[in-house]
Image (spheres, rainbow, N blue to C red):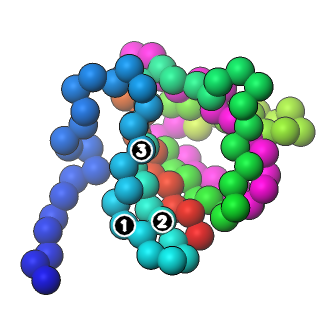
Amino acid sequence: MKIISKNIYKDLPENLHDEVLQVIAENTNVKIERIISNGQSSPPNFWYNQEQNEFVILLKGSAELLFENNEHIKMLPGDYIIIPKHKKHRVEQTSKTEETIWLAIHY
């Protein structure tokens, strides 16, 4: 198997009308995704309620998350959080002036 080097900031989609989720690697226990946002937010009244824990680090841009207990977390490049499974949350906003690039690890 040939080892391939890639760059998390390269090969971004040109048209970002919708948020883009790209699976980088996965197996039965772990999924690693690159998420690219451009001003998107969760739909009204929508809450993520995931089956796995999630480690999320913001690599570029900015974002604000809202948790079901009305806790807001603003994120800037380098900020990361661990979201426990079944902790309801939503994306309130992402940067409208540049791409927001996240790395998410579901485990």
The answer to if 79 sits in the magenta stretch is: yes
Residue 10 pos. (x, y %): 20, 43
Type of amino acid under label 1 = Ala
Asked if marks 1 and 2 touch (Cβ < 8 Å), the reply is yes
Residue 71 pos. (x, y %): 82, 36
Q: Is residue 44 above or below residue 77?
A: above
Horizontal arrangement in the rendering, residue 107 relative to residue 35 (left or right)? right
Type of amino acid under label 2 = Lys
Horizontal arrangement in the rendering, residue 66 relative to residue 16 (left or right)? right
The residue that label 2 is drawn on is 31
The residue that label 1 is drawn on is 25
Out of 79 and 69, give the one closest to the viewer: 69
Q: Secondary structure at mark 2?
A: strand
- Seen at 70% across and 43% down, the residue is 48
The residue that label 3 is drawn on is 21
- Seen at 28% across and 50% down, the residue is 8
**Residue 66 appears in the figure:** yes
- Seen at 37% across and 28% down, the residue is 99
Which residues are the magenta region? 76-98
Type of amino acid under label 3 = Leu
